[in-house]
Amino acid sequence: MTESATPAPLPPELVAAVLDLDLPQRHLDDMAAAPDAVGDILLEAAGEMREYEPASAKAVLQVLREHAPQEDHRQYSAHMLSHILRTEGRAEEADRLIDDLLRPGALGRGMAAVLAQEYEETAPETALYCYNVACRSVLAQPAQIVGQLDPLGLVLLTGRARVRERLGLAPDAHDDQARAADGSGPGAGTEGELLDRALHGASEREGEVPVVYVAYTREHLDEAHAHGLIPDSDTHHHDVERALRAAARDAPAVPLHTATATPDQITAFAVAADLDPAEPATRDLWARTLEPCALRAWPPERNQVCWCGAGRKYKKCCGSPAVC
């Protein structure tokens, strides 16, 4: 059985700052049950509060900006904070946050992908910079590697080609390969086929990419169901557990992982990548933008807290033999 790594202790300054936030107890309980997911939990909390309690949301995001252990969480919190400030008419402050993200060497791949899509229509030069960051590892390799990319990588590379064309730049080798493979070239496959390859491992490099199954957080199940993102909020986590078990039976040597998401996270990613947020493959593609520390090895030990966030032992929750 796969063992979960012991999570690193949280920075004391983060713990102190979180306790000063006066968060609802359920968020504190979630953090106590899954200390390695504190960044995601705080982002989810801020996402919930941004509409009805923006001051509290900004306080949470500021704590993440200053103290989150993972750089990705600091960047996502700055991005969300900039949107809140912009709705308050504080555009200059919002712009400063984005400018800080765009500093050379500062921008991470996940945030670069989001900003690239946001700026594609209004600021193509900035969008191209972001696409170059998001595609950096691919651009450092021969253009022939494009044929081996997962769908998310291909979406980013075709976006880069689109912006370069808009700016009047001559296509480079990666542009040509991306255009040939984005669904319009011979043998490239439809978008659905590309997504299916990402899920089921049709590409040769599948073994190099973590296999991650994504579930919605418990507090957002009704919201996910109401927006048509899942068919049944009552059985969602057990459905994901069954899929994990089936994958383990089909390929017992392949390590499996889980990650949790909110509807806002998946919808924002789907909009940025021009995908269907209700398509289960979109969640799996979103997971490929996460840092390894955001993934949890599956299955947990029987007496460990269940991956689904219910707070119960795995053997009495999704790991129960009754889930079959």
Image (spheres, grey):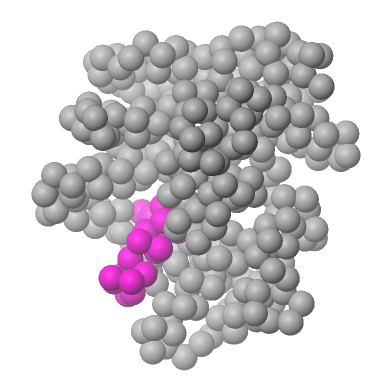
User: At x 31% / y 47%, what residue is drawn?
Assistant: 79
- Residue 229 rendering spot, x and y as whole percentages: 55, 41
Q: Who is closer to the viewer here, 9 or 96?
A: 96
57 left or right of 309? Answer: left
Judge whether residue 213 is colored magenta. no
Q: Is residue 218 above or below residue 240?
A: above
- Residue 187 rendering spot, x and y as whole percentages: 76, 77
Q: Is residue 82 above or below residue 217?
A: below
- The quarter in which the C terminus is drawn is top right
User: At x 68% / y 44%, what residue is drawn?
Assistant: 210
Res 8 seen here: no
Magenta stretch in the rendered image: 106-126
User: At x 73% / y 71%, what residue is drawn?
Assistant: 189
User: At x 71% / y 43%, what residue is drawn?
Assistant: 211
Q: Who is closer to the viewer here, 99 or 299?
A: 299
- Residue 44 rendering spot, x and y as whole percentages: 40, 31
Res 210 seen here: yes
Judge whether residue 124 is colored magenta. yes
15 left or right of 203? Answer: left
Q: Main secondary structure of the magenta part?
A: helix
Quarter of the view holding residue 105? bottom left
Q: Is residue 310 above or below residue 208?
A: above
Quarter of the view holding residue 130? bottom left
- Residue 5 rendering spot, x and y as whole percentages: 64, 24
